[in-house]
Image (cartoon, rainbow, N blue to C red):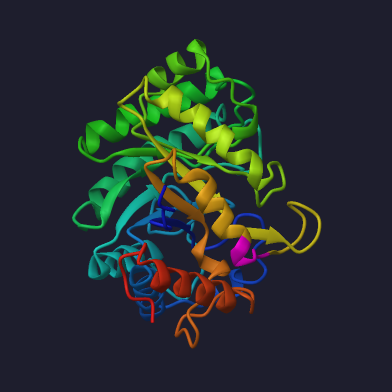
């Protein structure tokens, strides 16, 4: 089985967990439109095709001009416009994350009526303001919920409501979720029925190696089980969300740093036989081309970029020139 390369990555204007994002949040706050152009050109040259924007709002401030919340004070007044314009130039396809319209780390965010109001109103704003961009490809629902054997009913309701409004506004834009709890999935008849009920176009399950919930030798079995379930629901594509980071210290309470390439390569090899497409979390902060004009991240990000680019060149798997 040929190892599938990275075909897409999450991206963000500011990382929601400040302890994790210390190596790239300050740089990204200073990004101009020219920086976004340079960074996305790097990604495209490495064979990436998809960007999953984590969120259009965070900490009760927005990353685009909106009546719903005050703006973030960043170097680019409308970073979403800058991102999409840069993606247009590189022929990338962007899933726009409709969050976080409440407290991102609150278990109650799905039930928060004000967050729900903003979330649905934002869909209409985003479609009206940005759908002229060829790169505006689809939607991502970022309020992920843990799969504890099965999806939680409240999460299913949230996804279905977002799907319904999104398809009313942009009928042909696919929808994406990236749940965690992959190591606990019970891919039985109930799980298959829930996949049908979710009615989402793409499910990119987190491999959870970076957050130390799974070891690489375990993930192939998890995704093989998921493949059997998704084969019964052709409507819903099976993708992977491969975590290319490690923690410098305690999980969730310390900076994210790039993983060693031998680990990342093993992660890609593990999921490749079972998934349609591999996304990673995330290029931004974890990978930088040597001499990047838009450097953001840990110094070891150059090594991960170089090792992956060399692998691409040696295997021809990435279909791009990363030199």
Residue sitting at x 40%, y 66%: 315
Q: Is residue 121 left or right of residue 59?
A: left
Q: Is residue 277 left or right of residue 124?
A: right
Q: Which residues are magenta?
A: 257-262
Residue 78 picture location, percent across and down: 38, 66
Residue sitting at x 47%, y 69%: 311
Q: Is residue 259 magenta?
A: yes
Residue sitting at x 59%, y 71%: 24
Q: Is residue 23 left or right of residue 232?
A: right
Residue 75 picture location, percent across and down: 47, 76
- The answer to whether residue 109 is visible is no
Q: Nearer the viewer, residue 179 or 98?
A: 179
Residue sitting at x 37%, y 70%: 40
In the rendered image, the quadrant that contains the C terminus is bottom left
Rendered position, 53 above or below 82:
above
Q: Nearer the viewer, residue 191 or 276?
A: 276
Q: Which residue reaches farthest top?
A: 189
Q: Which residue reaches farthest bottom?
A: 291
Q: Is residue 51 magenta?
A: no
Q: Nearer the viewer, residue 190 or 261?
A: 261
- The answer to whether residue 102 is visible is yes
Residue 39 picture location, percent across and down: 41, 74
Rendered position, 118 above or below 267:
above
Q: Which residue reaches farthest right?
A: 250
Q: Nearer the viewer, residue 75 or 89?
A: 89
Rendered position, 163 above or below 268:
above
Quarter where residue 104 is shown: top right
Quarter where residue 321 is shown: bottom left
The total number of labels drawn is 0
């Amino acid at each position: 089985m040929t190892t599938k390369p990275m075909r897409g990555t999450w991206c963000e204007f500011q990382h929601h967990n400040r302890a994790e994002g210390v190596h790239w949040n300050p740089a990204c706050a200073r990004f101009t439109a020219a920086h976004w152009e340079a960074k996305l050109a790097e990604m495209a040259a490495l064979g990436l095709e998809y960007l999953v924007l984590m969120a259009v709002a965070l900490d009760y401030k927005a990353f685009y001009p909106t009546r719903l919340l005050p703006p973030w004070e960043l170097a680019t007044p409308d970073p979403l416009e800058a991102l999409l314009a840069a993606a247009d130039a590189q022929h990338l396809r962007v899933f726009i994350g409709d969050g976080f319209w409440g407290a991102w780390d609150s278990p109650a965010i799905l039930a928060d009526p004000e967050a729900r109001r903003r979330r649905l109103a934002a869909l209409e704003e985003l479609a009206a303001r940005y759908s002229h961009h060829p790169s505006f490809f689809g939607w991502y629902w970022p309020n992920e919920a843990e799969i504890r054997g099965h999806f939680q009913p409240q999460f299913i309701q949230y996804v279905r409501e977002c799907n319904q409004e999104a398809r009313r506004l942009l009928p042909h834009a696919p929808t994406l979720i990236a749940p965690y709890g992959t190591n606990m999935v019970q891919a039985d008849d109930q799980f298959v029925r829930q996949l049908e009920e979710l009615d989402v176009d793409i499910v990119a399950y987190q491999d959870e190696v970076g957050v130390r919930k799974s070891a690489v030798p375990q993930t192939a079995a998890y995704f093989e089980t998921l493949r059997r379930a998704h084969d019964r629901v052709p409507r819903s594509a099976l993708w992977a969300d491969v975590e290319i980071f490690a923690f410098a210290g305690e999980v969730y309470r310390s900076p994210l740093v790039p993983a060693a390439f031998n680990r990342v390569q093993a992660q890609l090899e593990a999921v490749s036989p079972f998934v349609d497409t591999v996304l990673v979390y995330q290029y931004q902060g974890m990978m930088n081309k040597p001499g990047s004009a838009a450097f953001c991240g840990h110094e070891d990000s150059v090594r991960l970029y170089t090792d992956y680019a060399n692998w691409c060149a040696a295997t021809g798997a990435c279909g791009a020139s990363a030199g």
